[in-house]
Amino acid sequence: MQNGHTGSPELTVPAIEDLEWMYSLMLEAKGADEAAAAEARQGKLQAALYPVRGLEGVCAALGVAMTDDDQMISSYRNLGDALACGIPLRTIIAEAYGRLGGTSKGKGGTMHLTDNERGLITTTGVVGSGLPMAVGLALAAQLDSSRSENAARAIVVTFGDGATSIGSAHESFNLAALWNLPLVFVCQNNQWGEHTAIDAYAANPNLAERVRSYGMHAEAVDGFDPMATWRTLSSALDRARSGGGPSFIECKTYRLTGHSGLSDYSYVPSDDLSAALERDPGPTMRRWLLENGYVSEARVSELETAAENTISEAFAFAQSSPPPDPSELLDDVYASKEGFPVR
Amino acid sequence: MTSTEVTNTQGAADEKKMSIVAALNSALDIALTIDEKVLIMGEDIADPIGGVMKATKGLSDKHGVDRVRATPIVEQTIVGSAVGAALGGYRPVAEIMFMDFLCQAMDQIVNHAAKTRYMSGGHSSTPIVVRAMIGSSNFGAQHSQALEGWFMHTPGLKVVMPSNPYDVKGLLLSAIFDDDPVVFIENMSMSYSVTGMVPTGDYRIPIGEAAVVREGSDVTLITYGAEVHTSLAAAEALAGDIDVEVIDLRSLVPLDISTCLRSVQKTKRAIVVHGSTQFCGPGAEIAIQLTDALWGELAAPVARLGASYTPVPFAAELQSIPTETSVIAAVQVLAEQG
């Protein structure tokens, strides 16, 4: 995290270069989503896609709130989270194409990105399964900091609102609170659990209120407001690093596309979708940057051109990256291949 | 019981008679002592109770409740947090009490622990041990299943099923310091009843090496876990009539088929004996591998003797798993063939 400008806490904003970085991340996430869907529609990309549209502001805020030492576990809807960790878009897209240049040598695919050096420890394709793993990763962080003079690190786990229905999420909330773990549960609430609206699957859709009862700090924030989200996540991460225990941050957004890349979302009420699109975090941040004079119109244009170039370059890199050699099939099942079946 | 060969003599000068539970405790104590990255997590494992079978007795007092960590009743999150701690650089041992409760944790074992290395392109590993116990029919059908076949069917896992205190300790130490996830399966019927001399120090038995625990020339019994004792008892009962060799596989993945082949090349007859269901059980894989390799040399088809394809029955009259009597009968039938 960069030091924010001083001032009253509710008005603090990140440094200019971080604001620019946030806006660029949002552009890259949206642009890469759309480019990947276009490739898939043309049959050129054979991959399950889970767009981040609507979550870009949350991902951007996370990227600035997390330090280089903090670590994350994400889900299948991970493109923005991966960018937040600082993973180059080209390796994310190369993984989508199943190429050697991907984060996982093409063996993971879109749902399974790993970049340990940049703090993305794993991403799961199973709804809610990241939370128990995050409990263990946070336990490791807690034990490490109790044994070393090194700066404490916080763990972030991201998941959708749908994951809060999963039993092990509740096991994890309880354990994180019980053990006072340095863990921030970041619920990217897009109001839809796959194709079912939150009101239809939760008797109490106030997720922060539900999780507060486990005995941890829990609050909701407007996930379409990147600054408010950044402030809330930053204080949650500070609390985790300083031994103050876990937090549950419900970032309220709205899913601006279908559940998956090419899936039908005609069932989404058009009034709700229109209202959400009015608050689309990318354009909202653009206006905010200009109105407050943080960035000039010319600089915004530069950032937009740079993002377009990054996206084009990422897809070109991915498409030219070689696939894994067929001999790779049997590698990485175990630490060593010796003695194991091949069929 | 027949003692197995000592493969690492370090500490062998200082031996002690141990139950399987004592051997588990000794291995865990050594692992916690020599590597601060070793953790244990599970229900009721901290002192004063020290685990429902007492396998962790004294360990939280000695090594601290941070490292010998009692959890709520949350099997999925015990294993899930073990996976996460492993990804964070630790070597966790997750104790899941009865194997049946692994059903609660299958997502973390099968979808996560087993696949993380592969799905990350080799960038990550999950060096966890999941300890679980086959219970007994006294508890009915939900505390007694032998489910090792499920884990054999999942690439990425190692599956260890020892039969005696010496192997328990040496294999558990190997499992804890193995860089792959290991499902370590115990059997409640042996926890206190099977004892043997065990070195008090550190020694390791490589995972994936079977042991010939009784030599014989007429029929080979290939088995593991508690059925090693059933098979040895049957072999002793048949001594003088049929000369039975008994192989204790010790692990199912990796599977030491070479030791089995060497034996069956000699005896020409083999039965795979296990407590999991015969239908689609481990014996099916072992039998076809032996048949493929020794077709034309076998005096009789490779036989299997596993559990009935039923839930484990409660009433003692309903006998599901192989007994000394049923193993003897199967050996006698096979010995007459060919």
Image: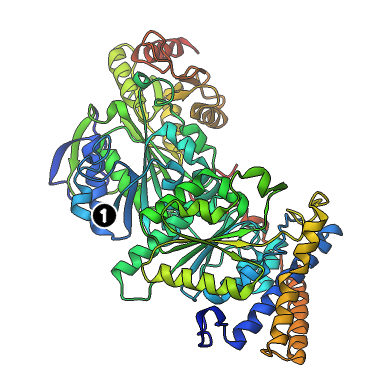
Q: Is residue A87 in view from this perspective? A: no
Residue matched to label 1: B32
Looking at the image, the residue that sits furthest to the top is B317
Q: Where residue B277 sits in the image (x, y, percent)?
A: 49, 23
Displayed quadrant of residue B24: top left
Q: Which of the chains bears the disc numbered 1? A: B
Q: Is A262 rendered above or below residue B55? A: below
Q: Where residue B105 sits in the image (x, y, percent)?
A: 48, 41
Q: Would residue B218 be found to the left or right of residue A297 on screen?
A: left
Q: Is residue A286 in view from this perspective? A: yes
Please name the residue shown 33% across and 60% down the image: B37
Q: Is B249 rendered above or below residue B110? A: above
Please name the residue shown 54% across and 41% down the image: B154
Q: Where residue A20 sits in the image (x, y, percent)?
A: 66, 84
Q: Would residue A267 be found to the left or right of residue B130 on screen?
A: right
Q: Amino acid at mark 1?
A: Leu
Please tell me whether mark 1 sits on a helix, a strand or a loop: helix
Please name the residue shown 33% across and 63% down the image: A143
Q: Where residue A26 sits in the image (x, y, percent)?
A: 69, 73
